[in-house]
Image (spheres, helix red, strand yellow):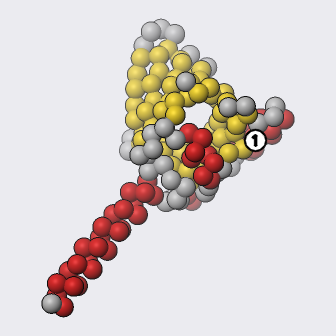
Amino acid sequence: MRAKQIKNIGIAGMISLGAALSLSACGSTTTVNSADIDVDSNDMTEAGTVLVNQGYQPLTGTSLVSAINNRTFSYRDGEKDANVNVTYFENGVASMTWSDDDGDRGMKKRLWTVEQSKYLCTWDHSEDDDCATVFTKAGQLATIDNDGEIHYMTQS
């Protein structure tokens, strides 16, 4: 009888640990390795001031998650001359599709999390993290990456 109880407790513990790890990696405000993310540059701070002066307000924590969860946003990537659509699914996966001015198209999926309750980060096994601060104004979003690049996004 005692061995069976220990086995059941062990199984319940493993299930709980697995659930906790899954939630921390998927669209939650839980931080995992937040010391490793590339954020808080001077460029990011200066661009944030520009957005606040334009009437945007920063989004953080659960407000940030609620604003993007199961929604698609579009923006123009001037560096790549492409139109980009990003959908942030509730399960923590972000689907990114784009088409450039030459007619080339592409798609990739990445995981997304909210780190330190204020940075929207997307992750990929083959790439470094890509983190941004997020601002909102009248239903529009603007993101700022650590290089200070602003993307004005509209909900699709």
Q: Nearer the viewer, residue 105 or 58?
A: 58
Q: Quadrant of the N terminus?
A: bottom left
Whether residue 141 appears in this view of the structure is yes
What residue did someone put label 1 on? 57
Which residue is rendered at x = 36% and y = 62% of the image? 19
Image quadrant in which you'd find residue 54: top right
Q: Residue 4: give x, y in percent of width and height.
A: 17, 84
Residue at the top extreme of this rendering = 102
Which residue is rendered at x = 47% and y = 8% of the image? 102
Viewed as shown, does residue 146 lie left or right of 156? right
The amino acid on which the numbered mark 1 sits, given as a three-letter code, is: Gln
Rendered position, 37 above or below 43? below
Residue at the right extreme of this rendering = 53
Q: Residue 18: give x, y in percent of width and height.
A: 33, 63
Badge 1 density bin: few <14, some 14–19, many ≥20, Cα 10 Å: some
How many tags in the picture?
A: 1
Q: Nearer the viewer, residue 126 or 152?
A: 152
Viewed as shown, does residue 21 lie left or right of 35? left
Q: Residue 127: give x, y in percent of width and height.
A: 44, 41
Q: Quadrant of the C terminus?
A: top right
Whether residue 111 appears in this view of the structure is no
Q: Secondary structure at mark 1?
A: strand
Image quadrant in which you'd find residue 46: top right
Viewed as shown, does residue 137 lie left or right of 76? right
Which residue is rendered at x = 42% and y = 41% of the image? 93
Q: Residue 24: give x, y in percent of width and height.
A: 45, 58
Which residue is rendered at x = 42% and y = 13% of the image? 104
Q: Nearer the viewer, residue 92 or 51?
A: 92
Rendered position, 118 above or below 6? above
